[in-house]
Structures are given as C-alpha cells and as structure tokens.
Image (tube, helix red, strand yellow):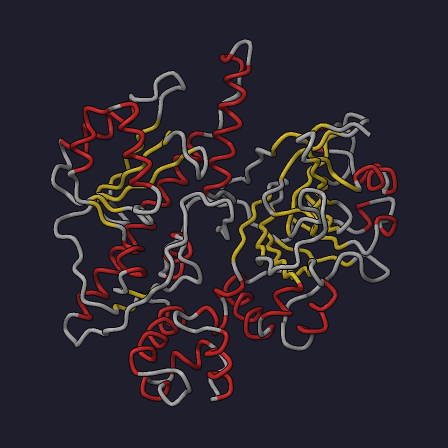
Amino acid sequence: MTVSSIPSTRLPDSDAASGTLLTVPGSVIREFDPVDVVSDAVAAVKPDIIIPADPDAGVVIPALTGSIDVPIYQPGRGMLPQTVETANGSVTIVVSPSIDSLPDDPMSLIETSHGYVVTDTLSLYIDPHARQTQLDGLEEYITTVDSAWITDHSLEAEAGVDISHLSTRLRSSYNRDVTVPDGHQISVAGIGTSRARLGVAVDDSTQPLTVTSVFPNGAVTTNTISPDRFGLRGITGVSETRANHLRTAGFETRSAVATASPHELTAVPSIGTNTAQQIHASARAVADEIIVSTGDGSLPTGDPVFIDIETDGLAASTAWLIGVLDGSASSGNYLAFRQPDLNAPSAHLEAFMTWLTGSARRRPVVAWNGYGFDFDVIHDQLQTHCPSYLDDWENRYTFDPLYWGRTQGNAEFPGRTNKLEHVATALGWEPTTQGINGRRVAELYVDWRERMNTADNPQTVSQPPWNRLEAYCEDDVRALARIYEALTDAHQTQTKNAPLKSKSDSSTSTSQGSLSDFGL
C-alpha cells in the first residue's frame, strides 16, 4: 500500500483545555520501585489515564493496581474498548483491545468533539538501505476498522466525530498526517516506544515516561522524562543503593526525606553530613516548591537582561528569533528580534546587538542553560553573519542560572526536571501559551523553511503562526525571570545563615527546544 505523510503542524487553540496521558513502559516497573516512581510522576503530571507500553507492557497493571488512583488501560488487552472523557468534556480517549474491537459507529463511544484511539498495532519500520520509513500495520488497521474511524470529518461535509490515532509502539517524536489511498488524511502520533530500531527488535533498555497532551482540535504534544527524576531516585545524590537504604530506614518518599532533618538522615548507611545536607535540600526544593540555596557563589550585580532563542533544532544552523525581557517577570518589556526573511540572516542579529550595546550596555545577560546552548549559538551566528559585533559579545558578562545552581552546587531547584518551564511552574509561574514546546517550534519553522525553499512561488507559501511562536518565546523569558527572582530571594536569605557546603555534581543535561521534551 502506498501512502504519503507530512509532519503535523496543528496547534491547539490558545485557550483550549487538554487531556493528559502518561505512558509507562514496563521497563520502568522492572528497574525502579514502581509505586515510588509512578506515584510521584502522577502527582507531578496529574494524568487522566495511564497507558502501559513495551518493553514488558504486561507488568504495569499488576504492579500499580491498588496503589495508583488513575485509570490504567492497556491497548491490546481486554475484550471491549475502554474510554475516558477529559478536557472539560471535549475529548474522549478510547483504548482499543484490538483493531476489530472498535464498533462501526465511533459516536457510540465518543460523544465529545474529538476522539483519540490508543492502539499498539502501528509501529515504524526503518529501511536503512533505502533510507525510508513506513508505518507497519497501517494497511490492516485502515481496512479492518470502519471508515468512520478514518475519515477526517473536519475537512468533509459529512457528519461524524473527528478521530486521531495514538500508538504506544511509535516514539513520541512521531506526529504526522498520513494520506491513505482513498484520499483521506488520518492523524497518527506516537506516545511510547518504537517497535523497531533500524528494523530490529524492541530496545529493552529503560524507556522514558511519556506525557502526552491531547486537545479538542486534534493537536497533540508530547514530552518525555527519565523515570530517575521521580521518587527517591529523583533526589540529588540518591543512587539506587541509597534509595534502598532510605526505604529500609523508613524514608519511603521524597516528602518523608524533606520533613526529616539532615541529622536524622545521617543515620542512614552511606549518608554522611554533607550528603545528608545535599539530599535534604533537594527533597525540600521539590516538596516545598522553592529554590533552596546550597552554596556561597555570587549572583551578578546590576539589572539582568533575560534572553531565550528559537532555532531550527539542537544542531542549530540559525537562531531565527531572539526573545529579550527587560525588567521583571510580571511587568518587564518583551522585545522580539526575529529574522525578517530567509534571505536576511543578519538583520535581526544586528538589531539585537545594537540594542544590547546601546540601551542595555554593561548589564549581565542571563539565559537558562546558556552555557550549554544559547550563548554558543549566538556566538556562532554573530561570527557567521555579524562578525563586527563578535568582540562585544565575547566581552559581555553572561550568566547561566542552571549552571550556577546545579553544576556549581549553589542551589537546588523545585522542578522534577531541569527544564525551564518545569522549574518555573513549580515556583508558581503560569504560562500564557499551551500545547507547544521548543521541539514543535523548531518543527514548524523547519517545515516552513523547506516549503519556502522548494516552492515555485514562495509568496504562495502559508506562514507559520509567528505570533504564537513569539508568545512561546516570551513565556520562556518571563519564566526565566521568575526563576531568577526566586533565586535572588533564596540567595539573600541564605547569606543570613551559614551556607551549606555540599556541592552537586549533577549533569546540566537540559536543552532549549529539546527533542525529548516533558518537555521536556
């Protein structure tokens, strides 16, 4: 069967409610304490439904039954489809035990504006020789279910409910609109692990947890997160061995560690005074949703300039948008320096540097994970397109709160990951955009760029929702300012007391627009 597919560019309405699925691979149950890790993940994510996935999907339900107060439905298991209604009654999630278990009429199961069918029958086959991919199981899928489950009613005059299809055997980076032989398009997204990697068997290593948001217009966003960021293993300095020692000593949850004193923790084998202080600070940060100062490093002097960049991916060849916040998280002035068109790669860089060396001269430039991404990308872009400004940038004082806090051991952050939005949200920041992350922003930009470069008449190419993308970048710099303000408060409080001496050797592994976003 010949099919074609294109990346989905669908974004949710800005004020739409969403439903949330948490995909739990069986490898997480096999390698971690399931109640500790999954309970903490549920508390953080607040999913409407938990979906088991391979490897070893069958172990998830037995391990969690009775300990998790969230429906756990496994595709490919059972006799009848199971449903969960969510997103303020506008979305129904249908978990299919088999292809032929779905009734002829979707409306017999779905009374909402959009339905999402969760299946385990669609997987990705990669032919490394032909450098092609195809959806395994698609032909059987579309020929077995009634056409009402395939028809895209949003594009047709006929009545019916709109349907999207989610597969636990497709990685979360897969989100495409597939055109089938009858001309209809079906939306297919991955919410789990791939059945094949270059045509071989399932990878049995630990797979990440996947958080999927689904919206009434068919938009899907996914983020992944390592299971070792939840529960006791998510505490800085707690290895698998220390987690077992903590449980044996009666500290079975992160909250229990947070409410203990560092002195009490020293009674646990392998935990000395400095380690106890580190573990306690990390547990407190998440449990109390605060930044805990743990070192005596200095913060920059002067009013900071907060920046965030949007690129075409992690191996960035362009920084097409530089977002700047001048002032506080709540009332600062946002400036967007966006590349005007593909043939003008230097105009926005010049505008940014003119502002930075003029109105904002001698002020520190702050970026989250700046030493791991933003600062280097800006340097490379200036070197390529605006070399006259390179000295100004190289001599600028830059500051990365993530590096200062985690790598240099000066602070513990409250997010269950080091991602900007997770830390800021834990501190009470509320985004104004939703259903979009750095990966989706990069995908939308790259899709537009490819269409522009291949079009006979570029003027006919539809534009991305630039306002939405700029609003996402504004959210990021305001989130950064919120973190910096909380960091300043925590640091000022800590200087009144004796600073903790423990240093974290945690990795700074986080990235703007990461393709394994919860978020990442």
Closer to the camera in the image, 204 or 254:
204
Q: How many marks?
A: 0
Answer above or below: position of 277 versus 440: below
In the picture provided, is 46 more to the left or to the right than 379? Answer: right
- The answer to whether residue 80 of the structure is visible from this angle is yes
Answer above or below: position of 331 versus 506: above
In the picture provided, is 293 more to the left or to the right than 151? Answer: left
Answer above or below: position of 300 versus 10: below
Q: Considering the image in quadrants, where does the N terminus appear?
A: top right
Answer above or below: position of 252 versus 494: below
**Residue sitting at x 46%, y 68%:** 234
Residue 188, located in which quarter of the rendered image?
top right
Residue 287 image offset from top left, x and y in percent: 40, 72
Residue 325 image offset from top left, x and y in percent: 26, 41
Question: Which residue occupies the extreme top position in the image?
Answer: 456
**Residue sitting at x 34%, y 18%:** 344
Residue 296 image offset from top left, x and y in percent: 18, 67
Residue 332, located in which quarter of the rendered image?
top left
**Residue sitting at x 50%, y 72%:** 231
**Residue sitting at x 48%, y 71%:** 233
Closer to the camera in the image, 469 or 239:
239
Question: Which residue occupies the extreme front position in the image?
Answer: 129
- The answer to whether residue 116 of the structure is visible from this angle is no
Residue 98 image offset from top left, x and y in percent: 83, 53
